[in-house]
Image (spheres, coloured by chain):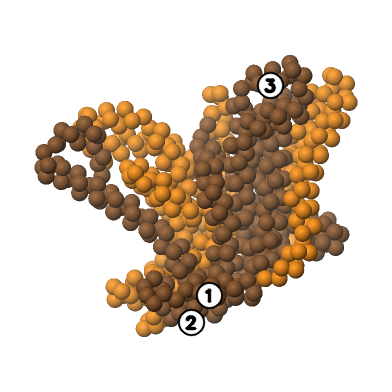
Chain colours: A brown, B orange
Amino acid sequence: MSVATAGRLESTAAAWSLPWLAQRLQRSLLHIAVIGLTLVWIIPTLGLLASSFRPAAQIITTGWWTALSPPLQFTIQNYQDMLNQSNMGTAIFNSFMVSIPSTVIPVTIAAFAAFAFAWMKFPFRDWIFLAFVGLLAVPLQLTFVPVLTFFVAHGIVPDNLTSIGLPPWVGLWLAHAGYGLPFSTYLLANFFRQLPSDLFESAEIDGAGTLTVFFRIVLPLSVPALASLIIFQFLWVWNDLLVALIYVGGSADVAPLTVNLANLTNSLGQGYELLTAAAFFSMVVPLAVFLSLQRYFVRGILAGSVKG
Amino acid sequence: MDFNVLLQDIPTLLLVIFGVPAVLVGYIVGAEFLVRRLPDKNRPQVRPWIWVGPALAMVAGILFIPAIATFVQSFQDNHGNFVGFQNYATQLGGFPSGGVWIAIRNSIIIWLVIYMILVLTFGLTMAVLFDRVQYETVVKSLIFMPMAISSVASGVIWKFMYWYQPVGAPQTGTLNAVVTFFHHDPVAWLQDQWPNGLAILNNLALITVATWGLTGFSMVILSAALKGIPGDLLEAARVDGAGEITIFRRVIFPLMMPTVVVVGTTLVIFAIKVFDVPYVMTNGNFNTDVLALRMYNLLYLSHNNAAAAAVAIVLLIAVVPVLIFNLRQFRAVEARR
């Protein structure tokens, strides 16, 4: 697949010469490969999108591709039925209630810690940071039984939390916060460390306190890193199934979208037109976040994995 | 949808959106206020712990101590009596087809190796191909989009791709429509344990879903690394008469190797912990069990915490090489700082 340089293009100026033809052929093959791969990648989603707007009777008898040719018969009936018959409406509310604090808590606490790791001296600092790096790879599965046992023993379970007037998701927030902390701290500490130290020295000379330095200098300068991290953690929590199943899976009125969608998948034998609509309903928020903030999302992924 | 329920929940909503940040900021402001009351010489000793304390406490309480507790529990029965390696023996007995072995085979060979190869190959191919077209941004966004949606939703999307109807019935699943178009009998992708009950086909069907979901991730990172290769280098190779394939093999690939390794280690951690896709699509039936799903089922179906702890430790052992690699990598970077 050659993209020869401009210089070479000119040197083969004679139209319809053999190299010119070969190059045209290669260019076409390249475009076919690129567009072909992309098509293969979006067909599954397009298929489900088309299905979700088709009448239930047709979904069972014909494939989604027949809907794309006339007569066009699209309907929003599936979405109405889905909202009425399943508790996806409550579930999306729950997803927000789970995802917002599960993002705010670890990112804020990680920012405090990262500030200390980057700009303060204390005993065992480097060892503690190394432990955080090590914990990045530890499977969450290792923590489920003891944490759950602790939560149950201390009443941090949905029913009990509601009865004492707290939101039922507190246990899930704490779990997500703990699981998100090593990555958040690692990412932010690496970013904070790269801020120029002159800034801190001159702020100190001007008599600025630690709080002022943190809130007025460090945070404003770190907006790109914070934005990436917030989007990353929010999508991670929003899309998480396992942690939600473990800590609030038993109570349907507290469970987020993913848990409800998974239950719907496993229980619906016949009414699978509801499933098509429910799946898209669950994607609305992450897709909106992704499409509007793609730049930061990609930056976060690069910062998290490219070495150094 | 019952909107009244949502209206009743508005106080909770406000409490959550404003209360949680208020508590966090209140903590640091209050603690700093107290630190400033301390004598000058004590402040630098106390202050770091104020800032790093909450993170330390949470990581210790939610991750570190529970992990150690699980390790201890894996050597106990469900009543807390020490039983040595009995939990492991029960899980690892029945080689090669009983106990945890199907899950180990699927997690290590199918998910870790084949899945990683697929994601890296697709990611690298796309990074290289897309780099040469003007509409790169658009196609990259489309490939990357599955990253934003949940594995559960991906599972639903692909359930419809794999939908199976018996021979003769109209095939509404995309893949079986294609298969029957070529006069082949429809395939029950998720149930078919081809070849000879080894269950390669249905496991491949599952990793296809996850590959579809994560290729965007490897493509984006590899593409960034590709753009970091100096143009002069490729130019020089071209002037020397190297073909594009040679340039890829001898120049591009070696330079991208460190990034491929970094993406690979991330994929290992992801692959070994995979849960959502098998849970939604087969629930581990038809020999598609994986370690994380087996652990979940031991916990919730069998209520066998001790066995679940042993499986969790098997999971940990599988990621230890990556863990060590990450730590060494980190120290090497620190040393260069």
Question: A59 and B209: which one is in front?
Answer: A59
Task: Using the rendered image, report if marks 2 and 1 lie on a common chain.
Answer: yes
Disc 3 on helix, strand or loop? Answer: helix
The residue carrying mark 1 is A273
Q: Position of residue B40 (x, y in %)?
A: 85, 19
Q: Is residue B177 above or below residue A8?
A: below
Q: Which amino acid type corresponds to the residue marked 3 in the rendered image? A: Phe
Place of residue A155 in the rendered image (x, y in percent of width and height, measured from the top left):
83, 58
Rendered position, B44 above or below B106: above
The residue that label 2 is drawn on is: A57
Q: Is residue A12 left or right of residue B291?
A: left
Can the viewer see residue B97? no
Q: Chain under label 2? A: A
Subunit ID for the residue under disc 3: A
Mark 3 vs 2, N-terminal side? 2
Q: Is B89 left or right of B177, judged from the image as shown?
A: right
In this picture, is B12 found above or below B230? below
Q: Nearer the viewer, residue A150 or A177?
A: A177
Q: Which residue is mark 3?
A: A200
Dot 3: few (<14), some (14–19), or many (≥20) neighbours within 10 Å? some
> Around disc 1, counting alpha carbons within 10 Å, would you say few (fewer than 14), some (14 to 19), or many (20 or more)?
many
Q: Is residue A16 left or right of residue B185?
A: left
Snapshot quadrant of residue A77: bottom right
Callout 1 amino acid: Glu
